[in-house]
Amino acid sequence: MRGNQSSKRLTILSESEKIALYGLPDFDDFQRIEFLAMTDAQRALAFTRKGLAAQLYCLLQIGYFKAKHAFFRFTLDDAPAQDIAFLMQRYFPGQVLAPQKVSDNERYLPRKEIAVLLGFRLWTDEDLPGLLNKATLLARTDVSATFLLAELMVFLVSQRIVRPGYTTLQDLIANTLTAERERLERLVESTLTDKTRTALQELLIRDNTLSELAALKQDAKSFRYLQMGMERQKRLTLAPLYSMAKTLLPSLGISQLNIAYYASLANFYTIYDLRRFKPGQTNLYLLCYAWQRYRQLTDNIVEAFGYHTRHLEDDTKVVANQQAVKIHNERQQATPRVGELLLLYVDDSLTDVTPFGTVRGKAFRIMPEEKLRSTGKLLTETPVSQMDLRWQAVDKHSRLCTKNLRPLAMALEFASSSASGKAWLAALQWMKEVFADQQSLAKQPLTKIPPRTIPNRLRNFLLSFDEEGKPAVLRADRYEFWVYRQLRKRLDAGDIYLDDSVQHRRFADDMVSMEAKADALKALNIPWLREPADQTLDALFVELDKQWRALDSELRSGKLKHLEFDPVKQTLTWHRPKADKDKQLQQGLYGKLQGRDVADVFRFVNERCDFLSAMTPLQPRYAKKVADADSLMAVIIAQAMNHGNFKMRRPATSHTTSWRPRTSSTCDRPR
C-alpha cells in the first residue's frame, strides 16, 4: 500500500488497473456484438431520449454498463469510433451523426432507468454502512487493499448495486484498515503482560550494532552442524514469545494470512522504524513475527533433519554397494586359481606316493601362500548379504548420525494421530529421556524398548545375541538411525506432523473447526450450499445427462474423429489425430515469421509487460547488487534449457563479460 502524495489517499490500483476498472471498455468485434446488441426494452429506453446524439449516448451507456456494471463520464468524441459506427449502422441506418453536445441531463438522468432495466440500483450514501461492515469482516481475512477492493466489487455485484467512484472506495478501505489496526493495537496492549512487553522490547535493543531481532531475521546458509545449532538457538530464543503469541493471536480473530502479513512488516521495517511506531503496533508486528518465524525455524530444522537422513541413507547405500562389488570381484578373481588348485587332485603326473611337499610347492606356484589362505577363508565363509553390508556401513557413519541427526531430532516435537506413528514417537521420546540423563541406549534393558519398533526381519541386525541365541544388548547406533529413518518416512507421508510448523502441519489445521463451520458458511454466502443436497445432485445429474447426450450425438454424426466406440467391448478409445502431411500448409505460417534470437524475444516481452521487475533474489540479504536484465534473462534461459548457470556462463564469458548469472542458490524468482 502506498500513499498518493497529491491527494493523500491510499493508492490501491496502478494507472493501468484504474483504466481497466474505471476506463471505457475496449471492445473487440465479438464483444461489440455481445454488449452493444440491444434488446427491445433497451432500445425502447434509448429511443425515449431527445435527439440522435442523446439516443446514441444512451445506447453506449447501456452497452458499457453491461460490460463493467458501472457508469462512465465521457463524451461522444471520447467513445471509440468503432462502437459508434456499429450502433449507427445497426440502429440508425442511413442517418448521419452531426456534431452535437449531449447535455448533462441526458448524460445523468437515464442512469437510474438503465440500472433498473438491468436489475441494479444506483449507489447511495445509505449503502455506505453496509459496505463498511463488509470491508471490516474482510479485513480480518486479508488486509491487503487490492483484496478488499476486489471483494467489495464482488459484493456490490451480488447485491446488484452500481459501484461507487474510485475515491469513495479509497476512503472506505483506508478507514477500514485504520480501524482494524487500531482494534488490534487495543487488544494487544490490553492482553500483554509486563514480562512479555519486556521480552519484546529486548528484541529491539542494540547490542554491538546488531540487535537480537536482526540476528533472528537471518537465515541459515546451509544444513551444516554450526548453522543448524544457530537455528535451534534462535528457536529457543523465540519460544517464550511464541507461547504468548499462541495464546493471544487466536483471540484477535485474524487469519493466518494476516498474521503472515504483519510478520512480514516486522521483517520489512528497520529496527529504528519499529522503535518509532506506537507500542501496540510494534508489539503486534513482533508477536506475529515470533509466531511466523518460530514456525519457519521449525521447518528449517525439519528440512535439515530430512536432508541429513536422506544423505546418510544414500551414503550407506553407496558404501554397501561398493563393498558388495569388491567382494564379488574378489570371488571372481579367485575362481580360476581355485580351479587350477582343484585340478592338482586329478593330475596324472602326481602319484599317490608323491611327497606332499612337492604338491604344496606346485600349489604355491599357482597361488602364493598368503593369497591362498585369504582366498580359502573368503570361500569358506558364508557370503555377506546386502543387508549386512548396509548395516555395517551404518556402523561406520554412526558419528555423523550422532552429530547431525540427534540434536535436530531432540529439538522437534512430533505428533501423530495413528497407532503406527505413535509407536515411533514413543521410541523418540524414550531416546530423549535416555540422552537427557546422559546415558547410552546400549545399556538400557531390552524390556524398555518401545514395542513394534524392531520388526522380526531386523532383529538380527538391531540386537546382539548371547551364546544361547537370546537377545542380550541393543545395538544402539543402528537402532537410533532406524528410528530417525522411520520418522522421516512417516513425516513425508503425513503420518507424523508438527503443530508448530508452516509446511508440516496436519491437513485439519487448515480447515475450519466444526464449531465455526456454520458462521464460516454464512460468511461465504455460497448459494448452492443453501440448497438441499438432493436438489443440487439432481441438477448436476441433469446437466451431466445433457453433456452425455451431446457427446453421443456428435459421436454418431462422425464429428469426433479422434474418438472411436467399440460396440462389442463397449469401450470408447481415443486416437491421436493424424497430422496434416501437407508441407505447404504446415510451413505456411512459420514461413511468414522472421527469425529472431531468444534474447530479442525476451527483450520485446519485457518492454511490453516489464516481467523482469517481478524477479527478486531468493536470498536478498546476500545479493551484492541488483541484477541487470541480461543476467536475469541468461539465468532464466539456463534453467529452462537445463544447462545450468555455470555451464551457460562458460561460453558467454568467452565472448563477453557484460553479464554473469548468479548460482541457483541466489538466482531470482518471481514475486
Image (tube, rainbow, N blue to C red):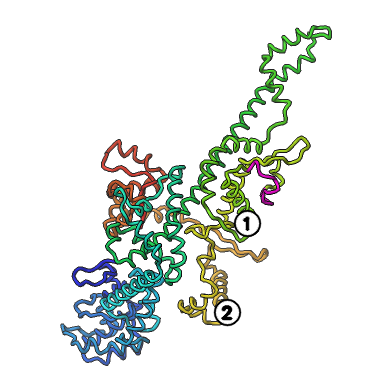
Percent position (x, y) of residue 626? Answer: 28, 49
Measure the C-alpha gap from mark 1 to mark 2: 38 Å
Q: Is residue 514 left or right of residue 218?
A: right
Dots 1, 2 in contact, CB < 8 A: no
Q: Is residue 554 visible?
A: yes
The quarter in which the C terminus is drawn is bottom left
Q: Can residue 597 be seen in this view?
A: no
Which residue is denoted by mark 2 in the rendering?
Answer: 533
Was residue 494 drawn as part of the magenta stretch in this picture? no
In primary-sequence order, the first of circles 1 and 2 is 1
Percent position (x, y) of residue 461? Answer: 68, 40
What segment carries the magenta color? 441-453
The circle drawn on residue 649 is none
User: SS class of the residue under badge 1?
Assistant: helix
Q: Which of marks 1 and 2 is in front?
A: 1
Residue at screen point 57% across, 55% down? 493
Which quarter of the figure has residue 349? top right
Residue 212, placed above or below residue 47 = above
The quarter in which the N terminus is drawn is bottom left
Q: Which amino acid does label 2 sit on?
A: Ala
Mark 1 crowdedness (10 Å alpha carbons): few <14, some 14-19, many ≥20: some
Percent position (x, y) of residue 533? Answer: 57, 79
Residue placed furthest toward the right: 352
Which quarter of the figure has residue 326? top right
Percent position (x, y) of residue 594? Answer: 30, 51
Mark 2 crowdedness (10 Å alpha carbons): few <14, some 14-19, many ≥20: few
Of residues 186 and 558, the one nearer the viewer is 186
Q: What residue type is labelled 1?
A: Lys
Was residue 442 drawn as part of the magenta stretch in this picture? yes
Of residues 652 and 265, the one nearer the viewer is 265
Which residue is denoted by mark 1 in the rendering?
Answer: 422
Of residues 548 and 69, the one nearer the viewer is 69
